[in-house]
Image: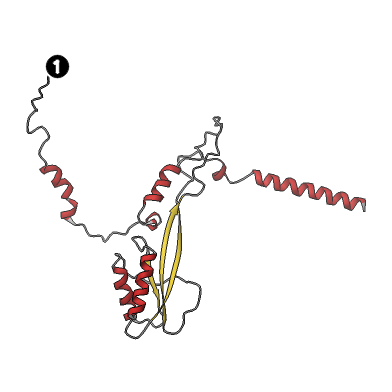
Amino acid sequence: MKNTHNNKLLGSIALALGVTLAGCSSGPLSETNTSLYSVNQPVVERTNFTLDVDTTRSGLPITEQQRLNGWFETMDLRYGDRVTIEDPSSNPAVTDAVNQLAGRYGLIVEGVAPTTAGMLGASQARVVITRSTASVPNCPNWDGRSDSNFKNETSKNYGCAINGNLAAMVANPEDLLEGQSGTGETVISTGTKAIATFRDAEPTGAAGLQDAQGGGN
């Protein structure tokens, strides 16, 4: 019995020591960053908002259109949001009705809707707004408060200001992940507009020097 008790005690001490050591040691990226890359990067999160509407063969009744438009206003539908429809009947009239309402806010109905919770009733469709937000977690980070820097590591707060402002100002947070895809076409009139404006501008000294007259003792 005494040996068993000692073995349990030693095992508990070893386990506690192992947990302590594991807590003190972490990955090299989180502890020491000797590069000029920022570990404080924007994180994009998506949230889905849903509204189930009643449908008919001709699309959406007037009452449902008013309800949907009121929901769009309440949600402050804006650039960067993604509007999709889950319609088991695949009725194009429903898509057209939702598309016309979303068009008032400068958006169009996109492709496949994301998976959401809950079952749809008979003759119902689900309108989904997918909204993305960007933030930089753990910023500002003032963990490194000591002036000594024996590891020559970058400040733990490095990148918080620039990336935090970028995450706050970007109109569409999804651009931080993929960016905008171009059409592959070059519009000459738009591309040369800035150059033409610069070339056609009158030099600032063309009118000569002003006759500045002043008095005084």
Residue 149's quadrant in the figure?
A: top right
Q: How many marks?
A: 1
Q: Residue at x 51, y 40 (%)?
A: 156
Q: Position of residue 8 (x, y in %)?
A: 84, 52
Q: Amino acid at mark 1?
A: Gly
Q: Position of residue 76 (x, y in %)?
A: 37, 62
Q: Residue reaching furthest top?
A: 217
Of the pair 42 and 37, the residue shown nearer to us: 42
Q: Residue at x 21, y 57 (%)?
A: 186
Q: Is residue 83 above or below residue 194?
A: below
Residue 80 in the figure: left or right of residue 31: left
Residue 176's quadrant in the figure?
A: bottom left
Of the pair 1 and 138, the residue shown nearer to us: 138
Residue placed under numbered mark 1 in the picture:
216
Quarter placement of the C terminus:
top left
Residue 28 in the figure: left or right of residue 66: right
Q: Residue reaching furthest right?
A: 1
Q: Residue at x 31, y 76 (%)?
A: 97
Q: Position of residue 185 (x, y in %)?
A: 22, 60
Q: Residue at x 57, y 42 (%)?
A: 31
The colour style of the image is secondary structure
Q: Position of residue 87 (x, y in %)?
A: 40, 79
Crowding around mark 1 (Cα neighbors within 10 Å: few <14, some 14 to 19, many 20+) is: few
Q: What SS does tag 1 mark? A: loop
Quarter placement of the N terminus:
bottom right
